Amino acid sequence: MCNTCEGYRQLRFFKKIIISFVNHSSSFVIDDTDIPSDVLKVSCGTVILDQSGPYVFPLTNHPRQEVNINSQNLIERHNGAWPCERRIQQRQRLREVTVTCIHYTWQKMKGRFWVYGDEAFVYAPKHPKMHCWNGICVLL
């Protein structure tokens, strides 16, 4: 008979287990304008596709072939990138961000700026009357 449990077979041994959950994220931007990709990533847009599950499949029927190719590349990269980690969930989201380019003439100077996203953010890197205070930029 066991002296610790006195024959009841209720021994319990514990090891210190540390479990951490990590979110791996990748993205790509297909952009035909001169706006930097990092600027467009932070804006909101219309979600065209939102796919989630233990495994997601690459897009194959989008009209722009570069979307299909980049979807396949991202999923293949994620499937083989972390072999020692267990995948719980995958998600693939395709967003469309509306971008409008405005050409202007002001005091005989020609230029352009862009309005983008659902928030109507303005990207005007060379606007002559742009003033910024504490990270907020205003066109005058």
Image (cartoon, grey):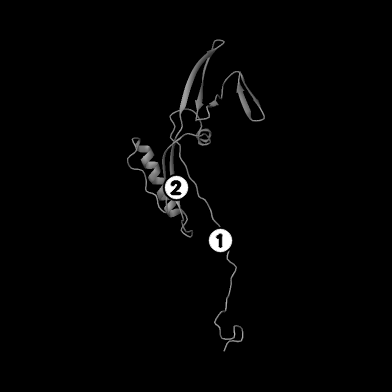
The kind of residue tagged 2 is Arg
Q: Nearer the viewer, residue 55 or 73?
A: 55
Residue 19's tag is 1
How packed mark 1 is, by other alpha carbons closer than 10 Å (few <14, some 14-19, many 20 or more), is few
User: Farthest bottom residue?
Assistant: 1
The kind of residue tagged 1 is Ile
Disc on the earlier residue, 2 or 1: 1
What is the number of callouts on the image?
2
**Circles 2, 1 touching at the beta carbon (< 8 Å):** no
- Identify the residue at horizontal 59%, vertical 86% (top origin): 6
Question: Looking at the picture, does residue 78 appear above or below residue 121?
Answer: below
Query: Residue beneath label 2, please?
Result: 91
Choose top left, top right, bottom left or bottom right for residue 64: top left
Give how far across and how far down residue 19 sits, in percent: 56, 61
Q: At numbered mark 2, what does the secondary structure look like: helix, strand or loop?
A: strand
* Lateral position of residue 67 relative to residue 43, left or right: left
Give how far across and how far down residue 78 sits, in percent: 44, 51
How packed mark 2 is, by other alpha carbons closer than 10 Å (few <14, some 14-19, many 20 or more), is some
**Quarter of the rendering occupied by the N terminus:** bottom right
Question: Looking at the picture, does residue 122 appear above or below residue 2?
Answer: above
**Quarter of the rendering occupied by the C terminus:** top right
- Identify the residue at horizontal 61%, vertical 26% (top origin): 137
Q: At numbered mark 1, what does the secondary structure look like: helix, strand or loop?
A: loop
Give how far across and how far down residue 85 sits, in percent: 49, 58
* Distance between mark 2 and mark 1 Cα atoms: 22 Å
- Identify the residue at horizontal 52%, vertical 18% (top origin): 111
